[in-house]
Amino acid sequence: MIVLAEQDWRTRQAAHRARVSRWTQPHRQRQHQHRKHPVLDFLWTYYSFRPARLERWQPGIGVALAGGQEFRHRRGFVDTPDGVALDPAALTEKRRSSTEFVLGLLTATASRKARLGCFGLHEWAMLYRTRPTDVRHTGWPLRLGHAGTDEVVESLPISCTHYDAFRFFTPQARPLNAVQPERADQVRLEQPGCLHAGMDVFKWAYKLDPFVPAELVADCFELAVRIRELDMRASPYDLRDLGYEPVAIETPEGRAEYVRQQRDFAAEAGVLRQRLIDTCREILAWARQPV
């Protein structure tokens, strides 16, 4: 058991809240003003971790907080001789099963070679043969229009392996994909070059809350923000009014730039994925020990 002095954990708590407020506060302001954001809203709608949860700090397993009585109202925390800490009994059978699934999925993903060159065509396939009233982000123009978007989809090979991207393809676009992923295929198909798999490291981190240190969750969220920006810069939408310069994947130069950034993000996500794999193993071992 690591024991954190009250001054030390309060310093970490304040630093975490200050770090994530750069995203949580603007989101709250947009909500208050009923303004949508085609890039950043995804991080709060597709992912279900509320801003207040992201702001909430926790030390993770095997850490006692001296003077941490305020944590006693949180589920899973108990008093110990050294301070308040997470109770291994909080890892219920259901949560143990979830941890084992996350560990299996992340380990399988990490074992594979990154497949690059999908060029973010999933966003284009979501618009294939749609009408202006059917777009996901209303109010934002398509850089090439609907006909031009369809031409790009038809001119490039589509090889999306991520089920939660593929399921939003239009019915006309689905047969154009090289694979037809189902939910049951997730562990078999997930691969580290996929931008969505990189963003999803955040999802798997918060799914294990409160057993994962808040700093690791924030690291995963920050990477998800940056990956999402590339995801939408390479999309058919023209978002320059929001400060997002397009990555024009309809051109050879744009595709080369996409692959370069995709490779960099795969490497960054790989580091976080391994940290989370290690954390999953630690959680499963820790749950067998008494406080």
Image: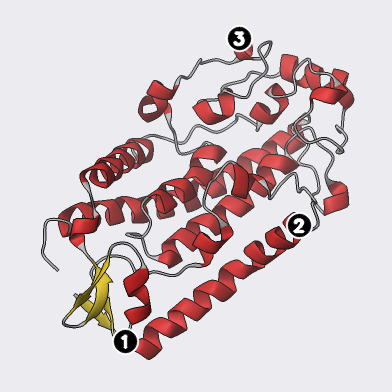
* Type of amino acid under label 3: Pro
Of callouts 1 and 2, the N-terminal one:
2
Of callouts 3 and 1, the N-terminal one:
1
| Residue 257 visible in this rendered orientation of the protein | no
| Residue 84 visible in this rendered orientation of the protein | yes
Q: Are marks 2 and 3 in contact (CB under 8 Å)?
A: no
Spatial CA distance of label 3 from label 1 is 59 Å
Q: Quadrant of the N terminus?
A: bottom left
* Circle 3 Cα neighbour tier, 10 Å, few/some/many (<14 / 14–19 / ≥20): few
* Type of amino acid under label 2: Arg
Q: Position of residue 111 (x, y in %)?
A: 33, 37
Dividing the picture into quadrants, the one containing residue 18 is bottom right
Residue 177 versus residue 110 in the image, above or below = above
Q: Indicate the secondary structure of the residue bearing disc 2.
A: helix
User: Which residue lies under the disc numbered 2?
Assistant: 30
Question: Which one is closest to the eye, mark 2 or mark 3?
Answer: 2
User: Which residue lies under the disc numbered 1?
Assistant: 67
In percent of the image, x 84 and y 40: which residue is there? 238
* Circle 1 Cα neighbour tier, 10 Å, few/some/many (<14 / 14–19 / ≥20): some
* Circle 2 Cα neighbour tier, 10 Å, few/some/many (<14 / 14–19 / ≥20): few
Of callouts 2 and 3, the N-terminal one:
2
Near-viewer residue (141 or 133): 133
- Whether residue 277 sits left or right of residue 175 in the image: it is left
User: Which residue lies under the disc numbered 3?
Assistant: 175
Residue 43 versus residue 210 in the image, above or below = above
Q: Position of residue 204 (x, y in %)?
A: 41, 47
* Type of amino acid under label 1: Gly
Question: Which one is closest to the eye, mark 3 or mark 1?
Answer: 1
Q: Quadrant of the C terminus?
A: bottom left
